[in-house]
Amino acid sequence: MRTFRFSSLLTSTMFASALLLAPISFAQTAGQDMQNAGTDTKDAAKSTGHAVKRTTKHTYHKTKHATRTATADTKSGTGKAVDKTKEGTTVAADKTKELSVKGYDRTKEGVQKVFDPNAAKQSKVTDRTRETKMDTKDTVMQHKQKIKDTKPQ
């Protein structure tokens, strides 16, 4: 039993001395704590600066790429809009001319019908032939305009 008490006392003493001496043996001075805190702050600032630099470069490159893409798309879209506007203008002018000619012909035919019914029939044939030729010519012009619009300038 004595051995058990002695070993128990020895263990308790070693444990108590370890607890009491540990802070003393690992303690730092206030100067060392301040130096460590300064080093930690400096390292954190370096790390933050590096992250900001990296993110800024990444954002710059992404913005540059997006701007180039948007510029190219806008340029392409503007060219298409110009071509479509030109084509629409050509078609509208042709339709306006066609309707004006048809209106004139109908008026002329109505007047001729009143004064000379035989002349009205001949005039009708002549007018239809002229309108067909005009339609064909306008279609060819529109086709040429489309070809011209698709060629790069």
Image (cartoon, rainbow, N blue to C red):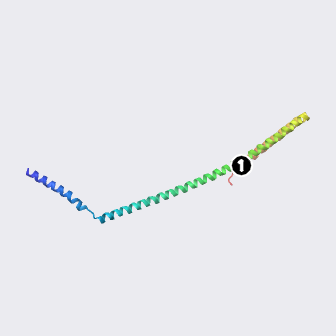
Does 42 sit above or below residue 11? below
Q: Amino acid at mark 1?
A: Lys
Asked which quadrant contains residue 39, the reply is: bottom left
Q: Position of residue 103 (x, y in %)?
A: 82, 39
Is label 1 in a helix, a strand or a loop? helix
Q: Is 76 placed left or right of 106 in the picture? A: left
Q: Residues within 10 Å of mark 1 (few under 14, many from 20)?
A: some
Residue located 31% across and 63% down the image:
33
Q: Which of the two residues, 15 or 137, is positioned nearer the viewer here?
A: 15
Identify the residue at horizontal 70%, vertical 48% (top origin): 85
What residue is drawn where x is 15% and y is 54%?
A: 12
Q: Going by the image, does 77 lie left or right of 103? A: left
Q: Of residues 3 and 138, which is closer to you in this image?
A: 3
Q: Position of residue 99 (x, y in %)?
A: 79, 41
The residue at the far front in this view is 30
Residue at numbered disc 1 = 86
The foreground one among 110 and 139 is 110
Q: Residue at coordinates 13% horizontally, 54% vertically from top-left?
A: 9
Q: From the viewer's perspective, is 147 left or right of 103?
A: left
Q: Answer with left or right where residue 23 lies relative to residue 55.
A: left
Q: Where, quadrant-wise, is the C terminus in this rendering?
A: bottom right
Give the total of numbered labels: 1
Q: Position of residue 16 (x, y in %)?
A: 18, 56
Residue sitting at the far bottom: 31
The correct choice, above or below, for 108 with respect to 60 in the image is above
| Residue at the far right in the pictured view | 115
Q: Residue 37: x percent and y percent?
A: 34, 62
